[in-house]
Image (cartoon, rainbow, N blue to C red):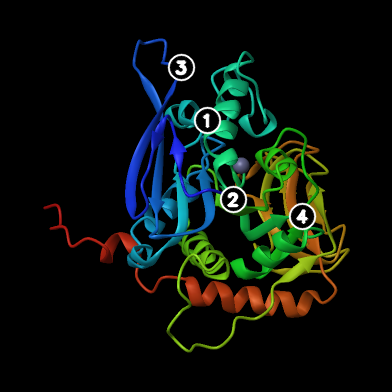
């Protein structure tokens, strides 16, 4: 790649930080709308990494992860270019919605087209201005509404460079996932761009462990791309993450009130009771049985279910016991001692 970085018709010099606002179709209220893109350029040429969040407009952990990444003092020593898009689906975010106002899923609308639907146009803009300008990408997601995910990387492990970055990210669980039709990851792969998808936490909520793991993961990937200098602390080497062999969903066998008997990151055995569904009128009780042995990497957070709804996502591993142990120490390490709201700002108490 040559050393110019042109976005939105502007050429951004090396050793600069810019906020570029790419014009989007306005709201019907006549309010103008833009896609804000932060571009941090180092003094030297190097990889061009984009990090994107809220492609699903209700998935907010990634937006907070990007806010914290942009405050990292080590960016002063950046090699290459960091392109950060904290809110891709601006329309959805306004309505706390995963979708666009035309009810399309942006992550099924790539690579998009100039004359297509609203979703297709936004996807097309993102491809032209961001993906075509970059050499690597990380897309940040959470579970869908009322679903929580254990921090995990989803990536195409058949590609050597993608696998290397997935392992560098440093969360204990990696899912080798096939590309979904119309996803940003698929469209980027077609341009030969290695991409990771980070999934952690729940829609419309901040989860501190997921956010911290995401910030650390991005820094680790940037170090492994030599965009940031190596860590100076001589801490123990990180344990190798585990790649799941496959995963499966456990679905509700009845409708009613749902209670979990096990949580995220826990090891379960095939045939074990992992949840209970009660008839809302106090009648029958139904057991939710694990259909596979493995680790719970996703679960429903709402106690109301209809028969057939997905309740638990279980990933199968060669050695689930070892994974469970590592997930536990990972979570302990990242859990804040004090709730962050109490220690990040010393605001006077409301009296
Ligand atoms: Zn998502």
Q: Comparing marks 3 and 1, which lies closer to the viewer?
A: 3
- Give above or below for 172 relative to 257: below
Q: Disc 4 designates what residue?
A: 156
Rendered location of residue 5, percent (x, y): 45, 43
Ligand 1 position by quadrant? top right
Is disc 3 placed on a helix, strand or loop? loop
Q: Disc 3 designates what residue?
A: 25
Confirm if mark 4 falls within 8 A of ligand 1: no
Q: CA distance from mark 4 to mark 3?
A: 33 Å
Task: Using the rendered view, name the quadrant where residue 21 is placed.
Answer: top left
Q: Disc 2 designates what residue?
A: 137
Is disc 1 placed on a helix, strand or loop? loop
Q: Which circle's residue, 3 or 2, is located before the other in the chain?
A: 3
User: Which sits in the foreground, 263 or 318?
Assistant: 318
In this view of the protein, can residue 292 be seen by the observer?
yes
- At label 1, counting other C-alpha atoms closer than 10 Å, the crowd grade (few under 14, some 14-19, many 20 or more) is many
Rendered location of residue 299, percent (x, y): 67, 52
- At label 3, counting other C-alpha atoms closer than 10 Å, the crowd grade (few under 14, some 14-19, many 20 or more) is some
- At label 2, counting other C-alpha atoms closer than 10 Å, the crowd grade (few under 14, some 14-19, many 20 or more) is many
Q: Disc 1 designates what residue?
A: 97
Q: Is residue 167 left or right of residue 23?
A: right
In this view of the protein, can residue 145 be seen by the observer?
no
Q: Comparing marks 3 and 2, which lies closer to the viewer?
A: 2
Residue found 56% across the figure and 37% down from its top: 55
Q: Which circle's residue, 4 or 3, is located before the other in the chain?
A: 3
Q: Which circle's residue, 4 or 2, is located before the other in the chain?
A: 2
Q: CA distance from mark 3 to mark 1?
A: 18 Å
Is disc 2 placed on a helix, strand or loop? strand
């Amino acid at each position: 790649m040559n050393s110019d970085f042109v976005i939105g018709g502007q050429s951004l010099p090396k050793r600069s930080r810019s906020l570029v606002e790419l014009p989007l179709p306005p709201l019907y209220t006549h309010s103008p709308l833009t896609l804000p893109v932060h571009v941090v350029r180092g003094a030297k040429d190097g990889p061009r990494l984009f990090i994107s969040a809220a492609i699903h407009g209700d998935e907010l952990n990634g937006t907070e992860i990007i806010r914290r990444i942009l405050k990292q003092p080590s960016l002063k020593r950046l090699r290459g270019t960091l392109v950060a898009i904290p809110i891709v689906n601006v329309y959805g975010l306004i309505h706390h919605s995963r979708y666009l106002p035309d009810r399309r899923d942006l992550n099924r609308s790539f690579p998009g087209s100039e004359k297509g639907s609203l979703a297709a146009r936004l996807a097309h803009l993102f491809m032209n201005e961001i993906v075509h300008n970059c050499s690597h990408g990380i897309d940040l997601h959470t579970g869908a509404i009322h679903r929580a995910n254990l921090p995990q990387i989803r990536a195409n492990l058949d590609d050597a460079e993608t696998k290397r970055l997935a392992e560098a990210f440093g969360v204990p669980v990696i899912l080798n996932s096939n590309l979904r039709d119309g996803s940003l990851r698929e469209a980027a792969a077609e341009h030969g761009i290695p991409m990771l998808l980070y999934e952690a936490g729940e829609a419309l909520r901040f989860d501190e462990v997921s956010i911290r793991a995401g910030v650390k993961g991005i820094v680790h990937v940037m170090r492994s791309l030599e965009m940031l200098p190596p860590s100076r602390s001589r801490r123990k080497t990180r344990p190798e993450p585990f790649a799941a062999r496959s995963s499966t969903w456990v679905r509700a066998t009845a409708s009613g009130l749902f209670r979990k008997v096990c949580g995220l990151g826990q090891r379960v055995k095939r045939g074990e009771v992992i949840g209970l569904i009660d008839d809302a009128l106090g009648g029958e009780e139904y057991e939710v049985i694990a259909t596979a042995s493995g680790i719970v990497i996703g679960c429903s957070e709402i106690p109301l279910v209809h028969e057939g709804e997905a309740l638990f996502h279980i990933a199968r591993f060669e050695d689930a016991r070892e994974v469970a142990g590592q997930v536990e120490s990972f979570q302990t390490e990242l859990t804040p001692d004090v709730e962050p709201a109490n220690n990040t700002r010393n605001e006077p108490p409301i009296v």
